[in-house]
Image (spheres, helix red, strand yellow):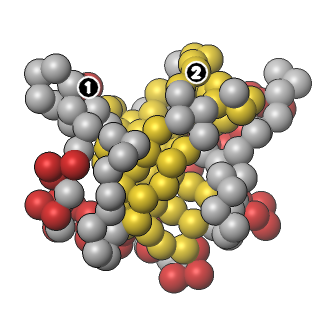
Amino acid sequence: MEIQAVQKEAFSVIGKEGSTEQGAGFVKQLWDSANANFADVQTLAKRDTAGNLVGLWGLMSDMGRQFRPWEEGFTKGLYLAGIEVDDDAEAPDGWAKWTAPASEYLRAKIVGDPSRGFGEVIQYIKDNGKELAGAVYDFNHPGENGQLYMYFPIRRL
């Protein structure tokens, strides 16, 4: 697995928000809803110079929306399935906007099962004397045919 240290300034995402309290499969339901209703937010999406989407994010947060890791052994928390937008964008009705804090991350390129990749990076963090400094994010890179990356914050900037 490729793991790289990167820094990212604060960024905003508009998406569909849900909670682990909704039960198994809630993340897929959020993505299905976001994709089905993309027309609501497509004009807000941040794009590169070629007009391509900058990114699709699955942001996670603790229940208090403080961008801390999911609670109770990563089993209880919030998830936002959406697109990166300019910081001044406003979420339409039925959508939520989160602004993730500037952080240093370990960015892992995920090949295969994302849950296995998550566990491997958590172990890598422990083995290298680092600590998880916040919630983990999923990132689908449109410029790489939707390649999945996971961002593990190790320090807030």
Q: From the viewer's perspective, is residue 132 above or below residue 18?
A: above
- Can you give x and y, in whole percent of width and height, for residue 73 in the image? 77, 61
Crowding at dot 1, Cα within 10 Å, few <14 / some 14-19 / many 20+, comes out as few
Query: Circle 1 — which element?
Result: helix
Taking the spot 29% from the left edge, 75% from the top edge, the residue there is 93
Identified by mark 1, the residue type is Glu
Q: Which residue bears the numbered disc 1?
A: 144
Considering the image in quadrants, where does the N terminus appear? top right
Position of 39 relative to 137 (above/below): below
Q: How far apart are marks 2 and 1 (CA)?
A: 20 Å
| Front in this rendered view, residue 66 or 32 | 66
Which residue position holds label 2?
7
Q: Whole-percent x and y of residue 121?
A: 66, 34
Residue at 64%, 30% in the rendered image: 103
Quarter where residue 154 is shown:
top right
Image position of 29 with respect to 66: above or below: below
Apparent side of residue 94 relative to residue 45 in the rendered image (left or right): right
**In what element is the residue under mark 2?**
strand
Residue type, mark 2 in image: Gln
Looking at the rendering, which quadrant does residue 55 occupy? top left
Residue in the picture at 23% in, 44% down: 45
Q: Indicate the position of residue 75 as horizontal and vertical percent values.
A: 68, 67
